[in-house]
Amino acid sequence: MRSVRAIPGVMFGALLLAAPAWAQTDSRLQASSGTAVSVPAVEADVPLSAQEAEKPKKPKKKAAGEEEPKNGLVWADRPSLRFGKLFQMDFRFKSQADFRQSSLDLSTRGGTFEWGRLRAGIKGSFLKYFEYEVEHDIETGGSWRDVYLNFRYDAYAQVQGGKFKIPFGYEQLTGPMDLDFVYRTRVSDALTPGRSVGGMVHGRAFKRVIRYQAGVFQDDGDNPPSLDPAPLLPGDPPPLPRQGSWAGRATVAPLRLSSLPGHLNNLEVGGAIVSTTIPEGRNNLNGTMVLGDTFFHSRYYTKGRRLRVGLELSWAPGPFSVSAEYIRSTDAREGVGVGNEQGLDNNLPDIEGRGWYVTGSWVVTGEKRDGGVKPRRPFLQGGFGAIEVAGRYEVLRFASAGAPQEPPSDSLRAANVLGNGDRVFTGGVNWYLNKWLKFQVNGIRETLDDAALSPVPGQSSFWTVVSRLQFVL
Amino acid sequence: MASRRVLAGAVLAMLMLVDARGVAAQTADDLFNDQVLHRIDLWVNTTDWYLLRANYQSNDYYPANMKWNGTTTTNVAIRSRGTGSRSQIKPAFRVDFNRYATGRTYLGLKAIDLNNMVQDASNLREVLAMKFYRSMGIPAPRTAHCALYINNSYFGLYIIVEEIDDIAVARLLGEGSGYLFEYKWTFAYNFEYLGSDLARYAAMYEPKTRATESLGALYLPVEAMIRTINDASDENFVPAVSQYLDLAVFMRFVAVQAFIAEADGILGNWGLNNHYLYRFNQKDLSQFIPWDASSSFRVPDYPIHAGHAESVLMRRAMIVPDLSALYFSTVLDAAAFNDQVDPNTPPGQPAPGWLEREATRLLDMIRQAAYADRIKPYTNDEFDQAAADMLTFARVRSAFVRGEVARLSGTGR
C-alpha cells in the first residue's frame, strides 16, 4: 500500500518540476477540438498494457495554414497541459450512469439507477521516454485505480511499474469505456485477477506481429478483493500475507505478415497465464450474476496454487468485430480435507472455474471498429453519430476438477463441491453520439444451471435490460 | 502411552467381535440396535477439530465424514451440543446429515446426537431409561452405545441418540407435520400461567418444525393450554384440558418417569425440563416426548410423588380420581415390568428382573470401552461404583415403589 501511495507522489513531483516552464507559456484554452494540437503520447481510455494492440498513428500532414501545436493549457478533446515533447498531462474524467430493469427485485440490488463509474485522473508523458497515469474513483469511498509509470526505451522494450491491471484477459484489459456491452462478461469478472502493484516488461516486435507482457506482482490482484484468513491455532506461524504472483501474456497477429489490407490484418490470437499461492482460507474464486448475485460462493477452503490460464482471439475487419476468450482457473486445496483412514487433512481436488464467450459486433453506419468507433458525423454536428449492434454468448461454470465419486455438497471441505454455472446471452445497441458521449442499451438473458442456488430459489432464468449513458473526457 | 494403545487395541478387537455384521441391510433400526456396541468413525480436519473444542460453547458446524458399519457418509456437519453436558474435553456432538446436502437423509434420519454421558458415570442411564419408556409404551427416542473414533484414534464411549424431529415424531406419533418444540430450561417453571405475552412461552419452547410461522400460529395454542390448565374449574378440568392434552397419555408418561426416578423431567426438582412438546397438525392437542434421562435411576427411594405439589398440571390431575388411579396403576405396571424375569431362566438360577438383566448386559458390552475412555470425567472406579448403584436400583426400586403406592393411594397390589 505504501508503494501505491508513493507513486502519485512521484507523479506530482514531476509536475512540480515542470511548473516553471508552464508559467512561461500561453495558458489560454484552445477552443476548437482536434486541431492545433499534437497527438497524445498515450491513447485515451486504454491502459498501457492494452495500448499495444492499437495501430500506430501515422503523422498527419499539416494542412496549409495549420498552426503548430501549442504549449500550455490546451484543448485536445480534453483539457491538456503540454510543453512540447518535454511534458504532457491530459486531464481525464469518466462517468457512466446506468438505468436498469430486471425480473429480479432491484430494490435490494442497487436500485434502477446506478453510477457505473465515476473517475477522474491524469495521463500523459514526460522526458520523451516516460508515460504515466493516475486515476481515482471519485465516488464516496473510492479507491486508486491505475497509478503507474512506464519507461519506453523502445516499442519492443518497455518497463512499467505501479498499480495497474495484471496482464490477463483480453476483455479485462480493455478499458471500461471501450466495451461493446454495458457489463463485462461473467468469465472476465470472475476469473481475471484485476489490478495489483508490481512491475512488468512489455513491448511489441516484428511490426507488431508479436506482443508480450511479463511481470511480477505483490498479490493476485483485487479480484476477489480480499482473502478470508485461516484460523490460527496455537503454535501456528503468523498468517501469511497474500503471496506474490507472476503473469505472462503473449499475442500474435499472423495476418500482419500477409498482404491483406490493414483493416483486415488485425486478427490477433494469444494466451496468458497468472500463477500465485493462496494461503489457507475460504478463498475459492466465486461466480456472480450480472446484477451481482452470487451463484457460486467463496465458501470452500483452498490452499496452494491458484493458476489462471486464458486463450484469446480478436479481429476487427472494418466495421465488424469478433472476439472470444476461454479462461480456466484452478484453486488448489492442499491439506484442507477432513481426512480418512489413510491420513488426516487430505488433499482435495482443485476447484475449477471454466468459462468462455464469443462476441460479435457491426457498426451499421460503417465506421471502422478497430481502435474504437469514432463517429464520422457526430450527433448535432451534421449527423446522427454512429450506430453499432452487438451480440454475445457466454458460459461460466465452477466445479471440482476431476469430479470425485461422491455426491456433490456445499460442505466447506467437500471433495466434490456443489457446482453451478451461468449462461448469458446479451444483445445490444451502441449509439456513439460523438467522441465523448455513448449510449448503450443491452438486453440480457441469464440462465443458471442449478435453480436451487438461484437468488430466487427454484427460478433459473432472469431478464435484465440496462441502458447506459457514458461521458468520457 | 503403551497402556493406552493396549486399551485401544482391546476395544478395537472387542468391536470386531461384537459388531461383526455385514454392511448389507443397513437401517436406522440397525444403527440404534442396542444389542451391539457400535463403532462410529468421524474424520474432521485438525484445524476444525481444534476449533470445535476451543469454542465448544458455540453451535458452529464443522464438516466431517462419518463411517458406520462399513459405509462412509461424506460431508456431514458436526457441532458441539448439550446444556449441562457441554464439554471441551469430551464434547457431545450433533451430527447433521443434510446441512451440507439439502434434503439428504442417512438411513432416513436427518441428524443424530452423540451423547458424551459426562453426567452419568454409569454410562447406562440414557439407554436404559429410553428403553424403559419404549417398553412401557411411551414414545421415546432410540439409543445405542458406540465407541467413537475421531481421526483414526479411539476417542471415547458415547451413545447414539435419535434426534427428535419431524421424522422421529412421525415414527413415534404417526404424524410429523405439526408443531414440534424443544423445551429450554430458563427458570423453575411448573405450568403456571404467564399471561398473554406469547414471547414468554416462546422463550421456553423453541420451535423445531414450522419455525418460520408467526408467533401466534406457534404459541397461541400453548398459551391457551397453559391458561386452561390453570383456569379451568375443578369440575371442568378434564374436558377443558383434554382439548390440549390427552391426560391419560400424560399420566402414564409421568408415572413411568416417576418409576425410573427421573429427577430432571416433567416433574423435575427444578421445574419442567428435558422434554419435547408436539402439537398435532390442525389440532390443539399436544403430547410430551421424553428427552435426556441422564438424571434417572439415581436414587432407589426417589419419591413417586416428587414434583406433584409444585406442578399445577399434576396437582390438579391427581385430584381427579380416574387420573390418580391411572397414575398409580401405571407406576405399579412399571414395577412389574422391572421385575419381569426371563422365562428361559433355568430353575434354581438367579432370576434378575428386566432392568437388572439389561443393565448387566449393557455393562458387559461397554465395560472395556468405558475403561479405555480416557477423557471421561470420572475414574474407572467411579464408573464401576455407578454401575453397581444402577444394579442396586434395579433390584430394590420395585419394592420401594409398591410401598409408596400403597401408602399414597391406600390400595397397593
Image: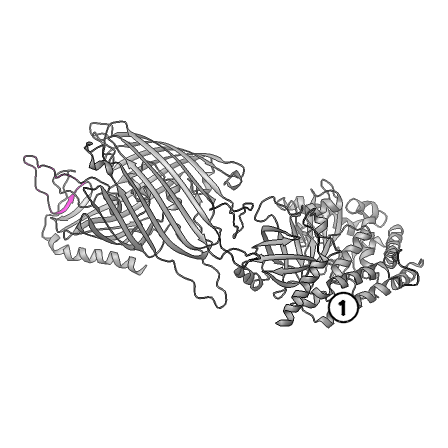
Q: Main secondary structure of the magenta part?
A: loop
Judge left or right: residue B17 versus residue B395: left
Q: In this view, does B395 lie above or below A14?
A: below
Q: Where is residue A142 in the image (x, y as percent from the top left)?
A: 34, 51
Residue A250 pos. (x, y %):
28, 45
Q: Is A283 positioned to the left or the right of A139 in the image?
A: right
Quadrant in the rendering for residue A206? top left
Q: Position of residue B411 (x, y in %)?
A: 94, 58
Let me know if residue A70 is in the magenta part: yes
Render colour scheme: one colour
Q: Look at the image and tell me whether residue A371 can be seen.
A: no
Q: Is residue A103 magenta?
A: no
Residue at horizontal 20 percent and vertical 51 percent from the top:
A157
Residue at coordinates 83% horizontally, 67% vertically from top-left? B392
Q: Residues within 10 Å of mark 1 (few under 14, many from 20)?
A: some
Chain letter for mark 1? B
Q: Name the residue under label 1.
A: B386
Q: Which of B289 and A74 is in front in this view?
A: B289
- Position of the N terminus of chain B, as image quadrant, is bottom right
Taking B287 as reference, is A364 left or right?
left
Q: Residue A131 location, x and y as percent?
A: 20, 50
The amino acid at mark 1 is Ala
Front residue (pair A235, A440): A235
Q: Which residue is drawn at 10% across and 44% down?
A: A70
Q: Of A404 and A197, which appears nearest the observer? A: A404
How many badges with numbers are in the image?
1
Kind of element beneath mark 1: helix
Report whether residue A222 is seen. Answer: yes
Instruction: Find residue B338 and report its image quarter.
Output: bottom right
Question: Which residue is outermost to the left?
Answer: A65
Q: What stretch is highlighted in magenta?
A: A57-76
